[in-house]
Image (cartoon, grey):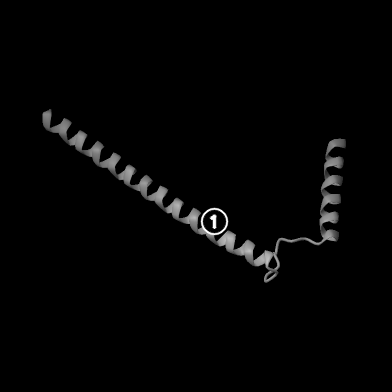
Amino acid sequence: MEDLISVGIELALFGMGTVFSFLTLLVVATKIMSSLVAKFAVEAHAMIDAGGVQSPRALSNDVLAAVTAAVHQYRRDKDRQ
């Protein structure tokens, strides 16, 4: 019986150690990716501000007006139903 309990404790510690190691690795990887994204985002904004690259997400005023009108009409039609 004593041997069975010691094997159970050993297995539990091994399992918890594995989970803890994986979660630690996940946190470290997330921090590294976050810092890389923040670094490249700052560089991209600097390039856009300098006029070197135009943002692909920038919409012209006509497109923005059309999208706004379509959303407004959709919401109005949805409220009528």
From this view, report whether residue 53 is shown above or below residue 66. below
Q: Residue at x 17, y 36 (%)?
A: 7
Q: Secondary structure at mark 1?
A: helix
Q: Is residue 74 above or below residue 8?
A: below
Residue pushed farthest left? 2
Q: Nearer the viewer, residue 11 or 4?
A: 11
Tell me which residue sits at (30%, 45%) in the image.
18
| Crowd rating for badge 1 (residues with CA inside 10 Å; few <14, some 14–19, many 20+) | few
| Callout count | 1
Q: Nearer the viewer, residue 6 or 16?
A: 16
Q: Which residue is most to the top?
A: 1
Q: Amino acid at mark 1?
A: Ala
- Say whether residue 62 is visible: yes
Q: Quadrant of residue 3?
A: top left
User: Which residue is disc 1 drawn over?
Assistant: 38
- For the C terminus, the image quarter is top right
